[in-house]
Image (tube, rainbow, N blue to C red):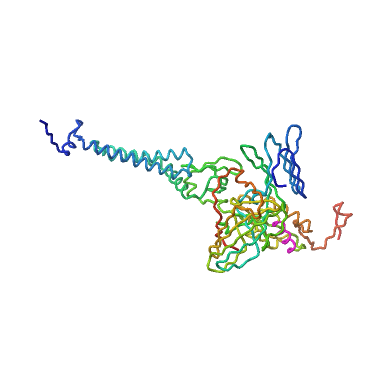
Amino acid sequence: MGVIVTFNVTEIFEIPIGIGSITVENLLYFAVIIIVGVAVAKTVSTNVRRALVERLPKNEREVLVKLVYYIIVTGALVIALPQLQFDLSGLLVAGGIVGLVVGFASQSVVSNLVSGLFLMFEHPIKIGDNINVAGISGSVEDIRILSTVVKTYDGIFTRIPNEKVFTSNIANYVHNAARRFEYQIGIRYEDDAEVAIRVIKEVIWTHPFALKNPAPSVFVDNFGDDGVNLTAYIWAPTRNWWDVRTSLLWQIKQKLEENGIEMPFPQRTVRFADDLRVTAGDAGKGGAED
Amino acid sequence: MFGRYSGTFCHENGDILVETERNGGFLTYRRNCEGRTFERILISETGETIINPVEPVNLPGDVTDLFMVEFSPMLIEPGITQTIYLKFPIEVGVFLEAAKDIEVLDIFGLGTQKYTLYGPPTSGAIARWYRSAVYPDIPAVERLREGVMELSIQNMSHEWVEVSCAVFDSVDMKIYYGDFVATTATMKIVTTHMAETDFIDAPLVPGMARSIELYTARKIPVIKRGYLMEWGLS
């Protein structure tokens, strides 16, 4: 003879577990919410890690991944706790006040954090780029969550908050493959400007990194007080432009001199109203005669 | 000059002197090319020295992988495939090889180099520039200064296309040497402003030896990729 036991599943869910009025159903809901929350947190944090693997250094990437993970788990906990009859209204009020205080206190931190994230995704600068931002020129050493580190050209470590970087005008000198620079070259009025232009173009042509295209441009720009001013526009690979700029000018000067073209020296012709004449003999004595 | 050497050797050819000599217990590598000198002491027991032509994008400094050959403008009929011969500049690479490793010792070249921008300043790319005439057959070249490129141009578009330059990614370049230096390339014209260029890994003339590429010696992993000329063909 067997004993037949019949029961209703819903009745099991309604069995109290002995703590307050919490039932098995509440406990199950709590467990399910927490498990789903942890699963979502793991999935999201894994994807965040993958997305940032080439954008952030490992240390900062892991901090961010953990932050995302715990925010989602905390959210799941907040949703699940009422199942265990925790009254979160008091917690929310306290949390709201604390949040307000923390929010005010960490306003700039959050602002820098958000700016840092935007910088990482917008990519206006990369590590190694030569930039000018907020009046600071140098090469980017690191882009962190809260700040960007720039090494100035005189070797000084400079930390710039990301908010300042993000809201400032950024000049990235190496973003494009080529960069133009210019020379102002003065020649005497008696020199032939066409010859000078030809000589300058020949010197530019001999330099490997003075680019063939865009073609260099050399022209008479203006007539100065002491001589004719020529301007030369030259394009060079961005990574080499400074070397080209520093090496070409002296070569141009030497080649111009070899061709009899010289730089003008400041000179002024002075005429005396009373036809003043200075003789060699009197000049030594400091005298003058009519 | 091109080949594999063990121990000491000396090659003098016009403006180029390449030698290794033993001083005391050391082997010294010495190179003089048009007045530019380079010297290294080599500590080696079994190492061999290999000299061969390499991709022409290393002198006077490493700024790009691309190189452009400019030639007289040609109008090409739609659907036509034509093989032409061009000259391209070469650089000479000196490698040290041991059982377990190969290393670049020196790169030098005759003459001067010139670079250009292919495309607009905002998005173009720097390329080594060289001007060549167009030849219907293999032209005579200075062996240490120039090589021969067999270029097969295929106009896959439906229009007449004017072409006056070809841009290549040197990473894909396969150089062979024998009596002269050679490479084989293709250029598939897709539209009037776009073409794909690539290299073929085959000697131009049977019996040529294949050069060691710089990216192989530098252990740079490379996926064969070709180059898409998207900034025009002239």
Name the one closer to the observer, A92 or B174: B174
Query: How far across and how far down the image is residue A45, in percent?
Result: 39, 41
**Residue under the point 50% across and 43% down:** A143
Question: What is the quadrant of the C terminus of chain B in the image?
Answer: bottom right
Which residue, as the protein is rendered here, is positioned at the far right? A281
Query: How far across and how far down the image is residue A24, in percent?
Result: 21, 35
Query: How far across and how far down the image is residue A235, in percent?
Result: 63, 56
| Residue A99 magenta-highlighted | no
Q: Is residue B105 left or right of residue A189?
A: left
Query: How far across and how far down the image is residue B65, in percent?
Result: 60, 51
Name the one closer to the observer, A245 or B20: B20
Question: What range is drawn magenta here?
Answer: A193-205
User: Against B160, is B66 above or below?
Assistant: above
Name the one closer to the observer, A288 or B33: B33
Which residue, as the protein is rendered here, is positioned at the far front? B206
User: Against A213, is B17 above or below?
Assistant: above
Quadrant of the rendered image containing residue A47 = top left
**Residue under the point 67% across and 63% down:** B136
Quadrant of the rendered image containing residue A30 = top left
Name the one closer to the observer, A266 or A284: A266
| Residue A196 magenta-highlighted | yes
> Number of numbered discs present?
0
Does the magenta stretch mainly form a helix, a strand or a loop? helix
**Residue under the point 79% across and 63% down:** A273
Which residue, as the protein is rendered here, is positioned at the far left? A1
